[in-house]
Image: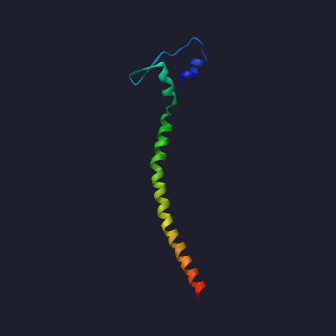
Amino acid sequence: MLKTYAKNFDNLDIKALVVEGQLLDGSQIDILESLPSKDEAYGLIANVLQAPVGKFATLLNEVPSKLARVLTAVKDKKKATA
């Protein structure tokens, strides 16, 4: 946001920046700019936490499905041999 604002004014040059009590020089603004916003960071964390739960739910659903497929295959094989 600061770099976009500074582009509108030719004479404005950011030399340093204070963030949460820490002094950052002008070259570190690019690093700060690349960080996600608070809401985006919360979203990333939520996705990371949700992924294992989703995979576990898929795993629990897959066990009965596999059993049903095996039982159907055994039934079909018995019909074919009979």
Counting labels gives 0
Task: Out of 74 and 63, give the one closest to the viewer.
Answer: 74
Where in the figure is residue 24, as x and y percent of width and height? Answer: 43, 21
Where in the figure is residue 20, as x and y percent of width and height? Answer: 40, 25
Where in the figure is residue 41, as x and y percent of width and height? Answer: 48, 38
Q: Residue at x 49, y 23 (%)?
A: 29
Task: Out of 39 and 51, give the one closest to the viewer.
Answer: 51
Q: Residue furthest top?
A: 11
Task: Out of 27 and 64, give the one closest to the viewer.
Answer: 27
Picture layout, residue 26 above or below residue 60: above
Q: Residue at x 50, y 72 (%)?
A: 67
| Quadrant of image for the C terminus | bottom right
Picture layout, residue 45 above or below residue 82: above
Q: Residue at x 56, y 84 (%)?
A: 78
Where in the figure is residue 53, as x and y percent of width and height? Answer: 45, 54
| Quadrant of image for the N terminus | top right
Q: Residue at x 51, y 28 (%)?
A: 33
